Image: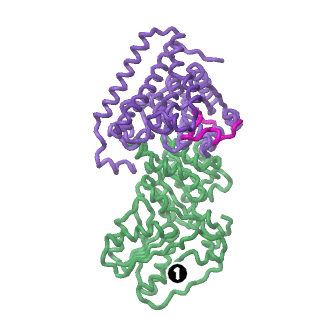
Amino acid sequence: MVSIINNTISRAMTDSKKVICFGLGVTDPKGVFGTTLNLEKKFGKDRVFDVPASENALTGFAIGSSLNAKIPILTHQRLDFALLSVDQLINGAAKWLYMFGGQFNIPITIRMIIGRGWGQGPTHSQNLHSVFSHIPGLKVVTTSMPDDTADLLYSSIFDPNPVIFLEHRWLHNSLGNFPKKLKKNVIGKCKILNKGKDITLIGLSYMTIECLEAAKLLKSFNINAEVVDIRTISPLDKKTIIKSVSKTKRAIITDTSNSFCGISSTISNIIYQNINNLKNKLEIISLPFCPEPTSLKLVESFYNDRYTIANRVLKMFNIKKTILLKKSSKPDVPGDWFEGPF
Amino acid sequence: MVYSLKKQVAINIHKKLFLIRKTEEKISQEYSFKEMRCPVHLSIGQEGVPAVLSVLLNKNDLAVSTHRGHAHYIGKNGNLKKMIAEIYGKKTGCSKGKGGSMHLVDKASGFYGTSAIVGNSIPVGVGLSYNFLNKKQKNLSVIYLGDGALEEGVFYESLNLSAVKNLPCLFICENNLYSVYSPLSVRQPKKRNIKKMIESIGVKSLHTDGNDIKKIFSAGKKAINFIKKKNKPFFLLFDNYRWLEHCGPNYDNHIGYRSKKEYIKWKKKDPLLNSYKLLKSLKVNNNVISNMEQKVINEINSAFKFAKDSKFPDKSDLMKDVLK
């Protein structure tokens, strides 16, 4: 996914001279986990630049530059850092179009990277997609599949509105293809990744991967799970969700955050409002209502995975067996490739 | 070096200053009829700086301002009818009734918005200047702020950003000594020299009386020349005083947060009086002044009539322009 993100930014900058790319570390030797490597060399220091550690001012700078002929991409190496810019995001970017009577749109993309595990802890791992989605005027996009990432990011960059583009750190090393032609119009559409008739597993960001793996596990029980990747949390593609659950009449909504006042609760409400012949009550698999702890031992009981999902499905189908949890020796890393520190 | 003011320039400044003063007075008079249903932060006493800036900036220079933004909007040649209509919540308002007094905009004249959050428009102003970098035609971004913004983190972030990237930004701080009712003495250290503090961050600065037309003109001209020649930001600090209450149409000297003595001291520096004196010293004919002022009064009256006659937004406008 890293090279796909890099290629997408590069393509966008080639396609429009207006696109500029900045953020802390964008031109440093690591290039934001590799996602911005070599861009400065290709496009010059006026279009790709490192910046002071001033998240709030930089968000305002992005707004201002977008009002005067630029299309900015601002990157935060952790979502948590972007919380310093909440004034500019909520009082500024989200409102500018509305409060000035539709005269100014703010075509900015703010990339925020979400950490997990390896002791990222309370302030390096927050999944705040629901918080941002509560604000009218912001679009919130999250990518799960590397093959979809290019279109989602390209669409975000050229969207006329402020878009928060969420990247899960655990997906950065996933492999996929970079499409020849990039689409500008995929925001606001869910994607069905796995067709099935028995239950709908709804996922977003990293949890979509766990949903897909759970669907594989369930196959040996003759349960065909449909996996819906949310992709755009705001605006939400209610139609695709309703259509899928109308067909399967069962659903589990998974979330990379807790469900209190969150997108999983909202989706649950949408399903209940629109479908009245569900075979089981809806299930939400989300995080406990506490921050992510740092210690490896505590993390074990904090996160859910494919086994949590699959076992919950078996319970719904009254299958007494449980899928045995294959305990990983390293439950706080996405794979052997990840050895910290962030 | 002191830049001198030509007669016609002084007349143009006076016209703007008088327009701002009389508009604000009219808002103050009409406010009790409860048709302007939004908070108003009037600029009476603080007209000098934006009136002078009106002759120093050109149309392609951009500006942003604060909750106390009427004067800056008018100073940047913002459409008066649309501003008054906005305060009346009308569809014909500059923000179509969505923003009110604290969210003024006139894209055509380069006035790119005001914010109700202290410090909020400062980095936006810095961002506006980015497209002016390395351009043949020299333009700049004007960022109006008050002394309260000097206590916001985003001000320092923005100033630093403009310095490190050498951006053509003109920061204009009108220090009126109060943030709502909190005096400078409870907000900033007593012996602070704001100009020196700004310069220690790496931005050149000038400090002068914000009521004296000649001094404002000279400082403004120096700042703008510096920005265009050196491709660097500049910070102007002006001493000003807010005659009326923080928010609303009335005087508030009776509530006890500032002394009458202090108020009278500042009122004597009245920028409008200063402008009359200047016109006299330049031997501007009294008839020229009174004819011009009558035209301004007519313009204000017709703006209020336009606003009152205009329609409110439609119900269907509620959900418009959330997203593009």
Chain for numbered disc 1? A
Label 1: few (<14), some (14–19) or many (≥20) C-alpha neighbours in 10 Å:
many
Q: Position of residue B133 (x, y in %)?
A: 57, 35
Whether A276 is among the magenta residues is no
Residue B91: quadrant of the picture: top left
Front position in the image: B104 or A234: B104
Residue B198: quadrant of the picture: top right
What residue is drawn where x is 65% and y is 77%? A297
Secondary-structure class at tag 1? helix
* Colour purple, chain: B
- Label 1 is placed on what type of residue? Tyr
Q: Position of residue A182 (x, y in %)?
A: 45, 55
- Could you tell whether B90 is left or right of B130 in the image? left
- Could you tell whether A265 is left or right of A334 in the image? left
The region drawn magenta spans: B166-191
A250 to A242, vertically: above or below: below
The residue pinned by badge 1 equals: A307
Toward the bottom, the furthest residue is: A320
The answer, for residue A334, to whether it is visible in the render is yes
The answer, for residue B110, to whether it is visible in the render is no
Front position in the image: B44 or B309: B44
* Colour green, chain: A
Q: Position of residue A73 (x, y in %)?
A: 54, 50
- Could you tell whether A76 is left or right of B308 in the image? right
Q: Position of residue B145 (x, y in %)?
A: 56, 36
